[in-house]
Image (tube, rainbow, N blue to C red):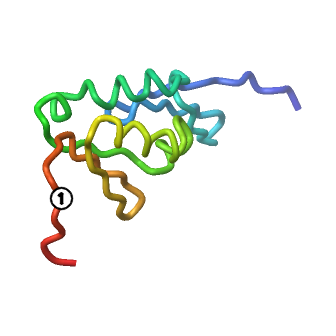
Amino acid sequence: MPQRSLRFVWRRARINAKFTLKLHGMAMRHSVLPMTPEAWFRHLFSAQAARDGGVVRRKVRDMERMVGRDVFNAEIRRRGYSAVENAGQMIVFCNAEPVTVVVG
């Protein structure tokens, strides 16, 4: 039986900057560009919502993989921001206002 040539199809996802590699129907997900912790924070806090003092969110898994929880917490404290975690998401309030849980 002749060996088939491998055909790779790259699809770029717009939202989460990931790409999918398809090899004969098998999909694998990889980060497009490995980021340094500094670049990850720069990207996070350069979002329009962060610059306007609003709210940004990231997956906890990504945050722990890219910068680590201790480094993340230290940076949030250094900036005087607040953060909450829920359902695998880290929500950052990019202002110094107190956060109040209304119902919960």
5 or 59: nearer the eye? Answer: 59
Residue at 57 percent of width and 33 percent of height: 30
Give x and y (percent) for residue 90.
36, 52
Is 46 placed left or right of 62 in the picture? left
Closer to the camera in the image, 87 or 68: 68
Q: Residue at x 59, y 41 (%)?
A: 27
Q: Residue at x 71, y 24 (%)?
A: 6
Residue 89 position within the rendered picture, expressed as x and y whole percent measured from the top left? 37, 54
Front one among 9 and 39: 39
Q: Nearer the viewer, residue 21 or 14?
A: 14
Task: Name the residue type under label 1.
Answer: Val
Say which quadrant the N terminus sits in: top right
Vertical order, 76 against 41 (above or below) = below
In this figure, which residue is indicated by the disc labeled 1?
99
- Residue 69 position (above or below residue 2): below
**Left or right of 59 on screen, residue 46:** left
Determine which quarter of the picture holds residue 25.
top right
Residue found 38% across the figure and 64% down from its top: 87
Image: 86 above or below 51? below
**Picture quadrant where residue 58 is located:** top left
Query: What x and y, as percent, mark residue 93?
Result: 22, 46
Asked if residue 35 lies left or right of residue 6, the reply is left
Disc 1 secondary structure class = loop
